[in-house]
Amino acid sequence: MASTVPQVVLFGDSLFQQCSDIQDGFSFQAALQSDFIRRLDIVNRGYSGFNTDIALRYLPEIFPERTASSPKMDYLVLLFGANDAVLPGAITKQHVPIDRYKENLTKIINHPRIAAHKPQILLVTPPPLDEIKTTPRSIENGHQGAVRKSAISAAYSEVAREVARENPGVILVDLWKAQMDKAISLTPDDYTPGGPWLGDPENGKQGGLDTLLHDGLHMSGSGYQVFYESLKPFIGKEWHGLADDDRKGFVIPDWRELLELKPNLNTGD
């Protein structure tokens, strides 16, 4: 039987659905795949608009029962919450109460279809929200006012941190902190320590979030680069630091090995 390539599954909402796009010359998914080519397959299971209620409902269809011939999921990268945090009463009907959001994340992490693979689970907090930018866009789209609040989005990110702490073995990828730290570093004069965060109307300034979130909610190429740098250290540690020509971990051997060529043969490829 032919070998199957282990998978890194990106399971989330539009923040993952869009991560294969090229923005500002950078593609998050392509960068990860390039790092682990022939060792791991980066599989995109991002669904625009999904909240954790929908994700949990469709999880059995998205993750079939594992069989002897199916690829093993070595890593599950989980990113939900941006849509759960939509305000109650919004016409999108995406809101999930914060307590149920926590329950749903826990159920997804411990779901039998996931547990069958025994993956390393990487739980990602939703990124910050630039409410200063999203509110006018919401009004333009026919809403009466803001449908997302930066403080509420931050609260959902804190719940994701709690879930990571409460589930042994789950690794937290704090995208909210990574993005906010980067935004502050880009525009340090726009943030006062201890004061309202960038993107909050109480602060009145978007600062570096304007660069990292192209529409206030979704990440730009620069935003995805911050995410990439935050996530990469937790994947494929056994191959970190290898030389470009080191083929350790290839699922299918390098062609030189298959043809029994000398390892140091210069073929010009």
Image (tube, helix red, strand yellow):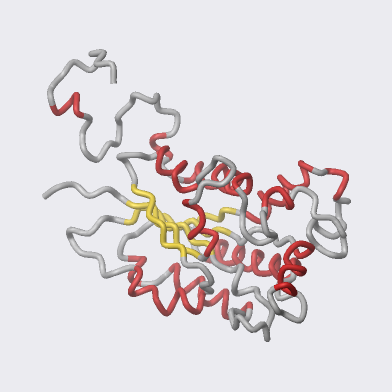
Dividing the picture into quadrants, the one containing residue 35 is: top left
User: Residue 133 placed where, x, y %?
Assistant: 75, 62
Q: Is residue 194 left or right of residue 243?
A: right
The residue nearer to you, when weighing 88 against 234, is 88
Dividing the picture into quadrants, the one containing residue 82 is: bottom right
Q: Residue lying furthest bottom in this view?
A: 89
The residue nearer to you, when weighing 268 against 181, is 268
User: Residue 232 placed where, x, y %?
Assistant: 50, 43
Q: Residue at x 56, y 46 (%)?
A: 23
Q: Residue at x 73, y 52 (%)?
A: 209
Q: Residue at x 44, y 44 (%)?
A: 30
Residue 190 versus residue 151 in the image, above or below: above
The residue nearer to you, when weighing 52 against 120, is 52
User: Residue 244 placed where, x, y %?
Assistant: 39, 25
Q: Is residue 94 left or right of residue 238?
A: right
Dividing the picture into quadrants, the one containing residue 200 is: bottom right
The residue nearer to you, when weighing 68 against 55, is 55
User: Residue 69 placed where, x, y %?
Assistant: 18, 58
Query: What quarter of the picture does the C terminus occupy?
Result: top left
Residue 82 versus residue 180 in the image, above or below: below
Q: Give the mark count.
A: 0
